[in-house]
Amino acid sequence: MKKVTINTLMKLKEEGRKFASSTAYDASFAQLFEQQEMPVLLVGDSLGMVLQGKADTLPVTVEDIAYHTRCVRAGSPNSLLMSDMPFMSYATPEQACLEAGKLMQAGANMVKLEGGSWLAPTVRMLTERAVPVCAHLGLTPQSVNIFGGFKVQGRDQEQADQMVKDALELQAAGAQIILLECVPSALAERITQALNVPVIGIGAGNVTDGQILVMHDMFGIAANYMPKFSKNFLAETGDMRSAVTKYITDVESGAFPGPDHTIA
Ligand code: KIV
């Protein structure tokens, strides 16, 4: 696979071509994903749930993410690699810079932070210091205790309008990717059309520029819970490489996520 950069994704967006991405946590799967030409990988703090068996992502540390970032980078030298900043690692812009530096030095090309326009000064400070940022909106799992559970976000008009405003402010602050999780497809479409930067969705319909899945969900092997918007591609194909290829081609053609895996 040729080296993937933010410019690659910007070009795909301009050409109206969709792209797939996946979480990854170790070198072997990262290599498999790269061999199947998955352009974007994420070391997600979902590792707290799928690797560590915790109930949510809050216990994950910067050291956990840095360790798995090193592992994934070893297996996939050419993907655009995003690494999650864990809960409470970016409470202030200064702290965010300090912790993000560790993830970039571990091999990340971009860090991902959860939150709306309150994060704009942090995004500005990071990007000015050469740390590219993906801003995660919608169901932001680190806020599970504020939301009272893993719930769809942006259903009412006021919330939806606020999310569009947040996305625009984060883009203006320098965010180079916006990730939307668990939002109605119509809202995801509105945000994708309003932004110049690529929008990656999970549980946001097939209207975004890119899709992401937690790899354990793609293979139907998550220990705890399988979200309704995810799909077990391994059950459909019977082997891991074909499952990854099927996921990528279904995303590129717009076949995934179909109506059964979309929040109306
Ligand atoms: O941590 C993670 O895996 C994520 C995905 C759900 C996008 O943030």
Image: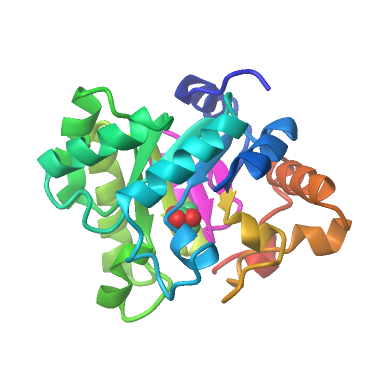
Q: x and y percent of residue 78 in the render?
A: 58, 24
The correct choice, above or below, for 159 with respect to 74 in the image is below
Residue 183: tell me if it is visible.
no
Report the residue that reaches farthest toward the bottom: 148
- Which quarter of the image is occupied by the C terminus? bottom right
Seen at 66% across and 44% down, the residue is 29
Q: How is the image coloured?
A: rainbow
Is residue 229 found inside the magenta-colored segment of the image? no
**Quadrant hosting residue 161:** bottom left
Give left or right: position of 169 versus 204: left
- Front-most of 113 and 161? 113
Magenta region: 189-211
- Front-most of 233 and 163? 233
Give left or right: position of 114 versus 256: left
Residue 151: tell me if it is visible.
yes
Number of labelled discs? Answer: 0
Seen at 48% across and 58% down, the residue is 47
Seen at 25% across and 58% down, the residue is 162
